[in-house]
Amino acid sequence: MITFDFTEQTALVTGGTRGIGRAISEKFLGAGASVIATYAGNEEAAAAFKLANAAHESRLTVKRCESQHYDQAEALYKELEKSHPKGIDILVNNSGIRKDAVLAMMKAEDWNAVVGVNLTGTFNMSKFAVLSMMRKRYGRIVNITSPCGDFGFAGQANYAASKAGQVGLTRSLSKEVGTRGITVNCVSPGFIGTDLIKDLSEDLREKYVAQVPLKKFGTPDDVAVCVLFLASKEASYITGSVLEVTGGL
């Protein structure tokens, strides 16, 4: 069994109360980290997550923040300067949405919403994280992207563009901050059993499973353990990389 020790470290996980984000938050808590988990608006899920992790209450902060809005991201970090004066050690940009349609029929607001949450949110949160991490000359940023950014899927031009953009941002940022002891990487999950794909029809689900060499969808824990590895001190020589968790896609 792989074990990690994040005692005395603080991790900020966007979209950290549901699905993959929840699994990541809980893995960090289990490894001794203090966790700030953000959510966009699902109060019920956030409350359920907080209740389920009451045993870690002293190390868990749950905050509402729509990271695609620069002012909200900035306000969150200003608040954290008071509540977590040592700054954060780890940022996981996990927040993501889908609004599928073929491009010719895609609404402009759906394009803007997906690119805003998935890519602009990554920029906003990373900018303020880097400013904090540079002061301590240490940090780990992990962006949750998708193989869709490489392959493209019909009806997902907005999602694919946002995820390809995350990879480009990751590689550029890794070169900017490497001398400051900060690594920046991506974890790229394939088909994972979460709410993000719950609207797939049974026929489409079977089609996608058939494409996976391991012939199954992954779990949020499959992704979370890879995030913890890249966020660990042991992964100090890995930066600008994309770790695929796809079952062989």
Image (cartoon, rainbow, N blue to C red):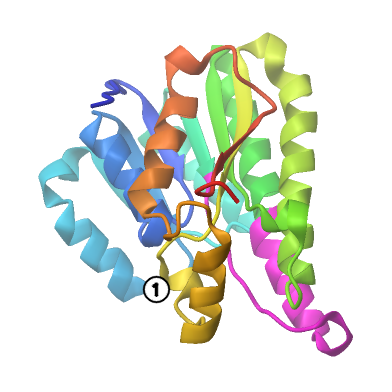
95 sits left or right of 159 in the view = left
Q: Is residue 201 visible?
A: no
Q: Residue at x 51, y 81 (%)?
A: 200
In this rendering, is residue 203 above or below 16? Answer: below
Residue 56: give x, y in percent of width and height: 16, 42
Q: Is residue 116 magenta?
A: yes
In depth, the one of 172 and 156 nearer the eye is 156
In this rendering, is residue 140 above or below 36? Answer: above
Q: Residue at x 45, y 36 (%)?
A: 227
Q: Residue at x 56, y 74 (%)?
A: 207
Q: Is residue 225 visible?
A: yes
In depth, the one of 102 and 29 nearer the eye is 102
Residue 176: give x, y in percent of width and height: 78, 22
- Near mark 1 (Cα within 10 A), the count class, few <14, some 14-19 or many ≥20, is few
194 sits left or right of 72 in the view = left
Q: Residue at x 34, y 54 (%)?
A: 22
The residue singled out by tag 1 in the image is: 42
- The secondary structure type at the circle numbered 1 is loop
In this rendering, is residue 77 above or below 192? Answer: above
Residue 142: give x, y in percent of width and height: 56, 36
Q: Which residues are magenta?
A: 93-120
Rendered-image quadrant of the N terminus: top left
133 sits left or right of 112 in the view = left
In this rendering, is residue 235 above or below 71? Answer: above
Residue 81: give x, y in percent of width and height: 47, 34
Question: Mark 1 is on which residue type?
Answer: Asn
Q: Is residue 88 magenta?
A: no
Q: Residue 30's image quarter?
A: top left
In depth, the one of 213 and 107 nearer the eye is 213
